[in-house]
Image (tube, helix red, strand yellow):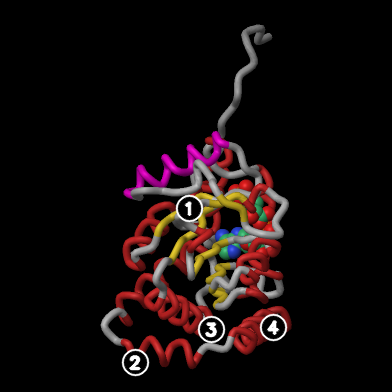
């Protein structure tokens, strides 16, 4: 019988590429890895499961509604003067490179903003983003507060979220999304749940899996960056509530046909 010190058994599951749900399982592994390294909060695993459920109802694909929302998001970012991308543990674990690419394309700052905040997690997430090419990541030394928010998520940086005009909020909690809107900021949510408070209060809501949504926003920025008329058209064509209703119709149709 083993009598040595306690050991932590780490099991990395190898996913065969031929598995029909390969991509989904790889995302799970990334998040579990993020949790083990301390980047993602344990609560993040639960939030991911909720997202997976909505993604399943969507048919695990990018809808035309998501593409239209990404185009509107790109237009909003191109019009912004002080855009900021807010990053939490799940987003850092799933797609740090995509965050950095979006920040470059949109000339945006990156700020770490955590619900389950600890200095250790903030600095691990900052390091993870820097390892993927990020520069000047904000959030480690917050010097401002979002009015009306008691949670740790209310802490922010004056130079970043506090003075931003457009904030990208992937996988956000509803309280902060609402508080940012009350501050007069335009927000871009990425959330697989079209019914969440965040989805219903953001200026633009992309209902898609975050690792798919961020590159699609980058593609739209590249497409629209020298096209001011296209930027205006993308914003005019986008109606958040109609877009969310169409996404919910896709989900109910999929449910009905299963
Ligand atoms: O890292 P922290 O401490 O800031 O905590 C991060 C979590 C995600 C735990 C925290 O923000 C949280 O509790 O979020 P919520 O309120 O559960 O909201 C997360 C939303 O994101 C839910 O509506 C999910 O359906 C959705 N979601 C989860 N995974 C994805 C997703 N949307 C897009 N892509 C995903 N991969």
Q: CA distance from mark 4 to mark 3?
A: 20 Å
Q: Residue at x 43, y 81 (%)?
A: 71
Q: CA distance from mark 1 to mark 2?
A: 30 Å
Question: Residue tagged by mark 2?
Answer: 229
Question: Residue tagged by mark 4?
Answer: 257
Left or right position of 227 against 44: left
Outermost residue, top side: 3
Question: Residue tagged by mark 1?
Answer: 111
Callout 1: SS: strand
Callout 4: SS: helix
Left or right position of 122 against 149: left
Using the rendered image of the protein, determine whether residue 13 is visible from the camera's viewpoint: no
Look at the image and give the residue range highlighted in magenta: 119-133
**Which comes before the other along the chain, label 1 or label 2?**
1
Question: Residue tagged by mark 3?
Answer: 65
Q: Position of residue 85 (x, y in %)?
A: 47, 60
């Amino acid at each position: 019988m083993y009598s040595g010190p306690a050991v932590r058994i780490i099991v990395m599951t190898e996913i065969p590429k031929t598995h029909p749900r390969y991509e989904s399982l790889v995302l799970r592994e990334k998040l579990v890895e993020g949790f083990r390294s301390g980047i993602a909060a344990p609560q993040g695993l639960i939030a991911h499961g909720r997202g997976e459920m909505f993604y399943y109802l969507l048919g695990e694909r990018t809808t035309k509604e998501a593409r239209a929302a990404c185009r509107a998001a790109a237009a909003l970012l191109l019009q912004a003067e002080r855009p900021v991308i807010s990053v939490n543990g799940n987003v850092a674990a799933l797609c740090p490179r995509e965050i950095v690419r979006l920040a470059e394309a949109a000339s945006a700052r990156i700020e770490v903003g955590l619900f389950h905040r600890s200095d250790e997690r903030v600095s691990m997430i900052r390091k993870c983003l820097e390892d993927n090419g990020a520069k000047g990541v904000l959030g480690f030394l917050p010097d401002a507060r979002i009015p009306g928010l008691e949670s740790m998520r209310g802490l922010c940086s004056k130079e970043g979220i506090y003075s931003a005009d457009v904030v990208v909020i992937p996988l956000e909690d509803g309280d902060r999304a609402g508080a940012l809107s009350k501050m007069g900021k335009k927000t871009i949510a990425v959330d697989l749940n079209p019914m969440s408070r965040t989805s219903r209060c953001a200026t633009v809501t992309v209902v898609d899996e975050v690792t798919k949504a961020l590159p699609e926003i980058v593609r739209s920025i590249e497409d629209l960056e020298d096209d001011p008329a296209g930027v205006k058209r993308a914003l005019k064509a986008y109606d958040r509530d109609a877009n969310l209703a169409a996404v919910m119709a896709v989900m109910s149709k999929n449910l009905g046909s299963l």
